[in-house]
Image (cartoon, rainbow, N blue to C red):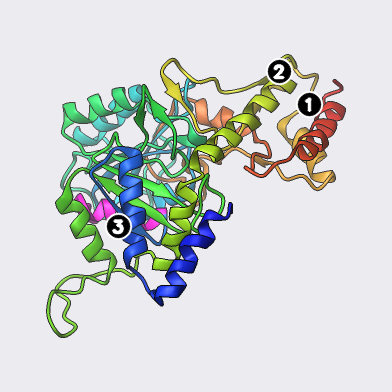
Amino acid sequence: MDGHEREFVSEVFDSNWIAPLGPMVDGFEAALAAYTGVKHAATMSSGTAAIHLALILLGVKPGDYVICQSFTFSATANPIRYLGATPVFVDSEAETWNMCPIALEKAIRACKNGEIAQDHLQNSKPTPKTGQHQTTDRSSPVSTNLKPKAILPVHLYGMPAKMDQINAIAAKHDIPVIEDAAEALGSHINGKPCGSFGDLGILSFNGNKIITTSGGGALLANDEEKIKKARFLATQARDPAPHYQHSEIGYNYRMSNILAGVGRGQMQVLPERIQQRRANFDFYNDLLKDVPGLSFLPEPEGYFSNRWLTTILVDPAKTGGITRETIRLALEADNIESRPLWKPMHQQPVFASYPFFSTGVSNKLFEQGLCLPSGSSLTPADHERISTVLKNVLKM
């Protein structure tokens, strides 16, 4: 928190408008739309809620296929199963760690050719020819619509995915894109903000994100009707009547006026937060760039990452046997938290039996990757403390 939040929250209290919706929500949505360059934004109770509604807006039904990045947090994939649809997981490419366009094309063709639908309810292990998995979840019927209903790429750790290539493939097959920019507010490709590339975009304001409303998210789109429908569904799908009437199933997904006030205050310091996160990356890069076996994810030409988290890969074959766990445990011994990179969805017990199109990249990233302390509030003293541990464990 910076202080600006108090001004907006005080205004909320002074107006006695605490409940969901209200002028702060309107103001926050307008600020998000302006910042990301989309025409419309609807704030939600979480980024997960926004993904759920995005899938509903695109007509995802039980048994439908949704292409989803495997290397991500489970909140990207869970809403697919809320709707009884079948996630088809696609591996990453090495340049951004995000959805591989080549594997995406293969996954779409496999869906459309019926190569998954034919057997995907059978109890099975990976097929020897493709390495794909078939689901054993019998609550998901065989799809009668073989063309995937949506593609869900993610901008992981703030690094933009290869959206030009992904969008070109999506357009060729006439499949809409839901862009998970939960970790990438402030990131862009050639000046175009993340969150504005897809048919629908998703943001998150969870407590660990680059700006926060404690809990919250947003749905972004240029299609006004879709955003209107999202707001309707997010407020329990209440029909316009003097009494409470509901013709559709709705959800309690809207953001409160008071949290939107926090969000408006956070928007004022977003440029500073991005600068602080990128400064963390520069600190680690300067400290560790010459250590054999340690590597960072550079920005491709034209890409700008908010560097939400600074990540490294640790190759024990080049570090003299030091692994990412060696470093993590050394930091933990000094009460400094770090974490492995996301465990891919195709390795998660709940999703392990679903179709997966592998490049081998995310398995290596999970095995060797570590998220270093990256909070916006890290002080020079914090950096010095972290530096001391890293120098000791790496024998620098």
Residue that numbered label 2 is attached to: 293
Please provide the residue range marked out in magenta.
Answer: 47-62
* Front-most of residues 179 and 243: 243
Q: Earlier in the sequence, mark 3 or mark 2?
A: 3
Q: Earlier in the sequence, mark 1 or mark 2?
A: 2
Residue that numbered label 3 is attached to: 84
State which mark lies toward you, 3 or 1.
1
List x then y, in percent, for residue 145.
16, 45
Mark 1 touches mark 2? (CB < 8 Å): yes
Residue 50 visible in rendering = no
Residue that numbered label 1 is attached to: 322
The C terminus appears in which quarter of the rendering? top right
Residue at x 55% of width, y 41% of height = 343
Determine crowd level at label 3: few under 14, some 14-19, many 20+ residues with C-alpha closer than 10 A: some
Residue 159 visible in rendering = yes
Q: Which amino acid does label 3 sit on?
A: Gly
